[in-house]
Image: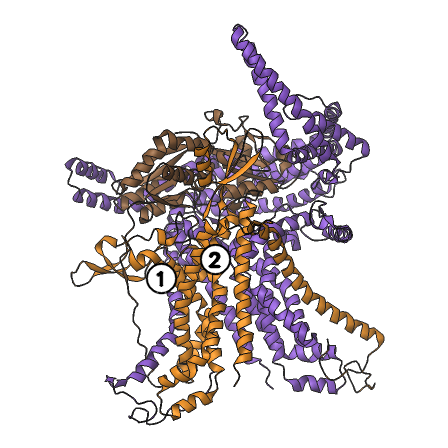
Chain colours: A orange, B brown, C purple
Amino acid sequence: MDTTTTDPDAPAPRGKANPFAARSPRRRLIERGVRQMLHLATYFILLCAFFIFGDIFVKGAPVIFGKQYPGFVNTRFFTHSPETLVVFENPEGEEFRLDYQEFEAFKAANPDFVVAKEQRNSYSGGGILGPLVGTALLTLICIVVALFIGLAAAIYLNEYGSHGRFMNAIRLAILNLAGVPSIVFGLFGLGLFCLTFPLIVGEANLRAGAPAFELFHSGVYLSFQGFGISMLAGGLTLAVMILPVIITACEESLKAIPMGFREASLALGATKWQSIRTAVLPYALPGMLTASVLGITRVAGETAPIMFTAAAAHKDKLPWQEAGEGGFLGFFGQSVQAMPYHIYTVAARIPQSEYTKPMQYGSVFVFMVLVMLLASLSVYLRIHFRGKLKW
Amino acid sequence: MKKTTLILSAIVLLGAGARAEDKIVIKGSDTLGAKMVPQQAEAYKQAGNAVTFEIAAEGSSTAFTNLLAGTADIGMSSRDIKSSEKDEFTAKGMEIREWIAGYDMIGVIVNEKNTVKELTLEQVEKIFTGEITDWSEVGGAAGEISVYTRNTSSGTYKSFQEMAMNKRDYGANTQKMAGNEQIASEVGKNANGIGYVGLAYVKADGIVPVKVDGVELDPKNSKTYPIARTLFFYSIKGKLSAAAEKFLVWATSDPAGTEIVEKVGFIKP
Amino acid sequence: MSQEAPAPAPDRRRNRRGAFPRKGFRVFGLGLQDFIRYFFGGNASFAIIVLLLICYFLAEQAFRFFPAHRQGLKIYREAGQEFVDQIKSELAAHSRLGGDLNIAYLSEVNASSQREDNLVRALQAVQTAVEDRTGHLSERLEDARETVEDLRDDLEDAAADPAKTAELQAALAQAEGRADALAPQWHGEAEAALDDPDIWRLDANPVKLTDAERVEIRDAVLRSEPGLDDVELPFFDALRKTSADKKAAAREGYAEFKTHLDALRGAARPLQSLSGDLVDIAAENRQRLDKFETAPARRRALLEGAEATMDPEERARKLKMAEEVVMEAPDYDALARPFYDQVAEHGKLAAQVRAAVVTAYEALPKPDDPAIRTPPGREKLRAAAADYAHLMETLTRVEKTLPKWRHDKPVSRTRGVLMFFAGRDWVTNSSWHDFYGLLPLLTGSFLISVLALVVAVPFSVASAIYVNQLAGRREQNLIKPAIEFIQAIPSIVLGFFGILVLGSFLREWSQGQLHVSPHGFVGSLPVIREIFTGICGFLNWVAQYVPGFPMSERLTMLNAGLLLAFMTVPTIFTLAEDALNNVPHSFTEASFALGASKLQTILRVVVPSSLSGIVAAVLLGFGRIIGETMVVLLVAGNKIQIPDFRAGLGVFAQPAHSMTGIIAQELGEVDQGSIHWRALFLVGMVLFTISLVTNFIAQRILAKYHVKA
């Protein structure tokens, strides 16, 4: 355990001049005790983590994995969106559990069946396809925007910027932005992206009450009406939130590239931008990849910023099934289900019973596994590239 | 410090999103929106109507805020519209139309282990306003009462206040829960808990409804039970799409629609 | 922090030849390179822009709260509600005193028959548990028995009709057969359930059952089969009777107590009826004033609507409605008249209340009275003493302020601000008046954060020291990523865990009810089960000495605080570890050279010199906790009340609401631009400010006290 080369417990010469000299057996016992306490504190944290993971895995895994081959993986859980779960009995007291649509089909197929003790559990049937898709889309928007801006900002900070008031202001802003509570980002996203973002729209799509200006009598308006509650608003809010993390991570990866690369390129007569493009960015790519995985991990689990900007508790269809003719904004302008919000719904809105538990633990289990995979990926990437790229 | 001026350009996006014709957005009460309306919607689609639904159930107040903002076609509410809300519609030049979705009784529920099975309306009022704080005061085993109520935008919160509490404010010792289901599950787990839920939710595990003023909570007592109310749909005159109107007519008068009202535990309109 | 960028070549604007030939292109004297530079600069300034935009959007809504709030307070005053609320505060103080005294009285009376009552409750608890266990069967048995009853009734009605009778008799026989077949089955299951010791675990019921009582309960449960009415249970009927007798006797003993108590509680009746009358008047006034506020807008909309319609009938209707909108200002003085009229009456009634309460309270026993035997009784009497002082204080205060009340006194700006920041009530969507007071939310947030920090700091700093100074390389490589994984757990998952697992665990623990279920995974492993049972026993013993325990709530500040502590461990750990890492090697080497041991070096050299970093880490952790939303929303219990600090450390066992939680819970439900909406933005603004200040201080500490090699 002890990695230092000096042997701290070697007997030291006693003397009053030496404040550290006294080392009675009692003293040693205390030392050992303190050491053990530090040790215990560390492992207690890990034990707590182990317990939380264990609880979710033990109760969640059976929802996804069956014991026998045909049901080895509960694919239904991944191919359906949340539905109402109908629990009922036949007159003999045998219990059935069916999702609402199955139940209707079942009733249609067996008109003689006497349904007894029917009870319905909202959000407890079906699967989690909708929330998974929604989270993926939100994360995608977020990471595309955040990476673009974050990288550009990092390039400025590391390559162009010189010390000065402007740079200090930017650094201060980044530090402070990192500490802003996520719910405040939610308020901000609601205020800016949902309600006031400028859009160019036709007369038919004007939102009542928003300030709008007609452009050149063309019937087209510049309207400060925002995107409404939509994927776009949510994704942008998340992007703003994650910006400090991405900037810092990108900057780290740029910093790691030796000065010599740039200098060599500049010496060959390349312009600043050319040297950045050809001699810096390609080598910073792995770092940026790691940054984006880190960003996705952080963003995928956030609930507060999307609560008012993007999330819907219940949606019939997947986004592309009802995009209609709306085009870009029609698709990204819809509200979506999202995993964290779905978990919030099943944790806070429905009771805990034997019928709702599979949905509750199943969702959390899948979500945890996904997040953990992403987290391990980011750890792996970091170690992998650290080993590989050495200058 | 050369030229650190910024070029800022507002990003302007082209928006052309038109709402698809056959989509019905319903927002409002959790009492209606958690069970009854989604099932009506599911059944309506099964009956061969090509529409899609978006349902959000955050509390009755949101029915009116969303109708006002134009973000919902239909509002569902477990209380009738307040005059101040009506004024807001008038002030925006809109007129509201009311549909009766059904009737509901609000059950006062306690934990099944609780020995108190009957309360007077006055006791209910005092418990929820925080005047009575201990079960021994209403004949139970000593223990501090944990009062669970709905969040403030809920219609149940408001109706209960009007019907059972003389319009007095809830005591500060009450805990605000997100939905009927959550109240039921909290009371079911807390031996000293009390709360209220719509008729459709009293069958949850671990809870029993108490008799209020001697009347049992049962649909057949709907005339005598002191805490009963009407459930509504609301729409805006002239702004209701044909598809949404067809659904409303179906849900409020077609036997297939009203059957569901009973199935989820309310009383037919 | 940034590297020194290579000094740009002085002649970079001139064309050069080389491996990368340059194209000429210039607008306003700026070349392509400059545009690229500004493009990146623009992106970098996004951080600043976003920060400014956040400030703008929060401030824009938040500061518009104050004028609206002031207007609301003005109406509150003009309508006379302020006047009535003062009387209400007297009544509330009085009712609290009465309530606490009553509970004390009941506690004394009920103590006389505690054993009997507990036995009856034990029977009920066991019965409920057995019913849960046999749920399916007992429902079916009950159904079958009901069918039998119904058929018997039908049979009686149909006595005249032989054909029907025969049919019914056949059905009856069948139903009886079914019930008879189910009954033994039920007995079997019920007996099996009764053999399980888990069934006999009686939540929070302190009764210790003797074997004879167990047999009685068992017998009673088995005899009261589902669907059978009026089963006679002589043992329990006798118990109930004894209980009633004992209570009656006890009541006699406390007759004097009761008389005074009733006198005290009844004393406020005239004041109550006065208050009731005034409440109605004030509510009516309020409605009138609110209507007047919105009248111009309504009228305008109606007129515009009339203009727009083509239909003459519709137009006439709208015009008529517009006519009917009452536009003239109400007569404020007349509205306030009834209140001024009642000032004298109130003075008289309040004096009566005071006199009656003083007499009655003096006659009632005090907490140290030997006649008071139960601990809860004493406790409640102690609470009553505080209530009494509070009531007297309130009476005196109102007596002074009420005559000075003026309906037309302007509401000062500071009062509007103060009512928000120092307001003790957050009451929204009220039928009376909406109050927006930050204090309950602020205290909730702070208490939870403090608890979380108190728990998290020792653990995270200890493990940072351990990992950085004591652990071997391999151990480091295990622990550091593991802690990073903790950071990756989404907060909503922790909230979920708090609701489903931690909450129930804490409550069971607090009630000393922890046990290993023999049906679970752990229960099936013999040795491990013993170990766990031992641990549970120990924890149950500890629970007696924890302040605030036992608690009946699952969702409390304690629950939220523990989860947040867990959540913030990685933050503090990482930063503290960094700080420890930054301590120059020469420090440790010097310490070793002086003969210090490893631990002495750590505690007296390394930790003190990295203290600034650790403090900054703790501050940043605090910023993270206070801004956390989902865990507190789900787990803290959402009770908007300033916690009762009289409970000492037990205060953490109470539920609370938080600033983040209230935004998340209410923002989705309120009208855009309404005062409530703005109040929530203002809360967001407060949060934002707190986080900025915390952050700023942490950065300053880091910059100022950083130890350099």
Q: Residue at x 41, y 69 (%)?
A: A146
Horizontal relation, residue C375 to residue A387: left or right? right
In the drawing, does residue B122 fall left or right of residue B155? Answer: right
Displayed quadrant of residue B109: top right
**Residue C541: where, in percent of width, then height?**
76, 51
Mark before the other along the chain sequence, 2 or 1: 1
Chain holding disc 2: A
Instruction: Identify the residue at the far front of this view.
Output: A69
In depth, the one of B57 and A50 nearer the eye is: A50
Q: Position of residue B47 (x, y in %)?
A: 36, 36
The residue depicted at 54 percent of the width and 34 percent of the height is B203
Q: Disc 1: which chain?
A: A
Judge by depth and name the residue closer to the eye, C297 or B88: B88
Percent coordinates x, y for residue A161 in the rendering: 40, 83
Q: Which residue is mark 2?
A: A303
Q: Position of residue B248 (x, y in %)?
A: 33, 36
Within-10-Å neighbours for mark 2: few <14, some 14–19, many 20+? many
Which numbered circle lies on residue A192?
Answer: 1
- Indicate whether C671 appears above or below A372: above
